[in-house]
Amino acid sequence: MLNRSTVLTDAQVSAVVPALQTQVHRDWAPVWGSDADLSFVATDAQPPAGAWWLVVSDDSDQAGALGYHDLTNEGLPMGKVFARSDINAGLQWSVTASHELLEMLGDPDINLAAYVFSSATAGRIYAYEVADACEADQYGYAIDGIQVSDFVFPAWFENFRTAGSTQFDYGNHITAPFQLLPGGYIGVFDINGGSGWHQLTAESMPAQYAMRARVGSRRERRRTPRDQWLLSEVR
């Protein structure tokens, strides 16, 4: 976890790492089968070779103006947390950090999806994003006083499941496959729809079409051809 923010001190960022580590080892790994050992990289330090990055910076507008990068300097997965944007919006940046960390572990290459067919030639592809459906801070939970994100279980992507038949998210807020909680969303691709990837939200059904994804978001990277992804430099 790299601190490159001007609004958070190294002490503030490093204090969150133990809670994220507990979440990954205790809550995430038994369900999803992937695990990670986290470490903190101070403002003036460099990450070790071979590491995946979770970078805490200030805001996406600043990053967009400077040019955006999608992978580490070794071409490995990278997550992004915009602390100042979260703080200005009254949100917990630690929830965003947890959100991005878990989604990086769930789909590091941002290329997985679940296909739900409605006929032989039609259906909908759901992006494999494990925290978007329950993204709102209100559904998160505390670990040693640090707020972290709720996340869905694999069953959320399994269309054969019936409502209430199993656990669909860690917090037990979701009761059926592909259900979106208030404040939640998911990227979808309608087969033969001609719309490409777009965003389905809980607040407005059917889907809302957002042609420009937020700079730095995984949705933006999912829409961007892989040959246009850039390597990052540590500053």
Image (cartoon, rainbow, N blue to C red):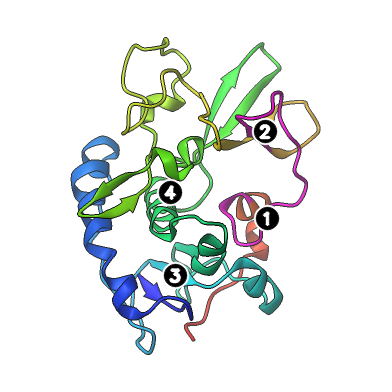
Above or below, comparing residue 163 to residue 97 in the picture:
above
Question: Pointer 4 and pointer 1: residues touching (CB < 8 Å)?
Answer: no
Q: Amino acid at mark 3?
A: Val
Above or below, comparing residue 232 to residue 223 in the picture: below
Of mark 2 and mark 3, the one earlier in the sequence is 3
Instruction: Name the residue rendered at 56%, 37% in the picture.
Output: 183
Q: Is 103 a magenta residue?
A: no
Of the numbered discs 1 and 2, the one sitting upstream in the chain is 2
The circle drawn on residue 55 is: 3
Foreground residue among 127 and 138 = 138
The amino acid on which the numbered mark 2 sits, given as a three-letter code, is Phe
| Residue 117: quadrant of the picture | top right
Q: Nearer the viewer, mark 2 or mark 3?
A: 3
The residues tagged by marks 4 and 2 sit, at their Cα atoms, a distance apart of 19 Å
User: In the drawing, does residue 22 fall left or right of residue 107?
Assistant: left
Q: Position of residue 11 (x, y in %)?
A: 29, 77
State the residue at coordinates (49%, 86%). Answer: 235
Callout 1 amino acid: Thr
The residue tagged 2 is 189
Under circle 3, the secondary element is strand
Locate the N terminus by quadrant: bottom left
Q: Earlier in the sequence, mark 3 or mark 4?
A: 3
Residue type, mark 4 in image: Glu
Q: Secondary structure at mark 4?
A: helix
In this picture, which residue range is highlighted in magenta?
199-219
Nearer to us of marks 4 and 1 is: 4
Residue 103, which numbered label? 4
Cβ atoms under marks 1 and 2 closer than 8 Å:
no
Mark number displayed over residue 224? 1
Say whether disc 4 or disc 2 marks the residue closer to the N-terminus: 4
